[in-house]
Image (tube, helix red, strand yellow):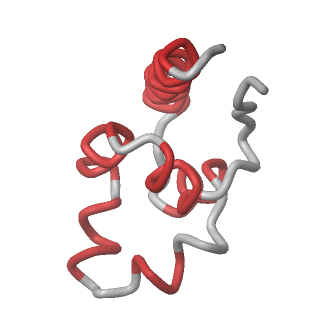
């Protein structure tokens, strides 16, 4: 089954299934969640859209991140396709 990515995908799911998203999201606010020691609390409840809003990410950067995350998901999907 192909993975499905939406703006309602939880941050925790992204970070656990697609490790490369960590490096991608780190400079956009993930670093602040880690520094404040709240990533474990927030990640299971925070969606990708919520992350964008929480850190006031511009529309341009949202589009860029969305495309990059989709590339990562497609790459993993191709790796595990039967």
Q: Which is more toward the observer, 51 or 75?
A: 75
Image-quadrant location for residue 24: top left
Q: Position of residue 58 (x, y in %)?
A: 48, 36
Q: Position of residue 54 (x, y in %)?
A: 53, 63
Q: Quadrant of the C terminus?
A: top right
Residue visible at 45% across and 29% down? 65
> Where, by quadrant of the figure, is residue 78 drawn?
top right
Residue at 44% from the left image edge and 81% from the top image edge: 40
Q: Quadrant of the N terminus?
A: top right
Of 14 and 49, which appears nearest the observer?
A: 14
Relative height, residue 45 to residue 61 (above, below): below
State the residue at coordinates (28%, 85%).
Answer: 36
Q: What's the residue at 62%, 67% (across, down)?
A: 46
Residue occupying the far front of the picture: 82
Q: Nearer the viewer, residue 45 or 36?
A: 45
Q: Is residue 7 above or below residue 77?
A: below
Q: Residue 33 or 78: which is nearer the viewer? A: 78
Q: Is residue 81 left or right of residue 22?
A: right
């Amino acid at each position: 089954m192909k993975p499905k990515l939406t703006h309602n995908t939880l941050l925790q799911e992204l970070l656990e299934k697609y490790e490369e998203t960590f490096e991608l999201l780190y400079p956009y606010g993930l670093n602040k969640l880690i520094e404040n020691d709240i990533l474990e609390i927030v990640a299971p409840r925070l969606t990708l859209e919520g992350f964008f809003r929480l850190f006031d990410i511009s529309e341009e950067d949202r589009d860029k991140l969305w495309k990059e995350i989709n590339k990562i998901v497609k790459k993993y999907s191709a790796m595990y396709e039967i």
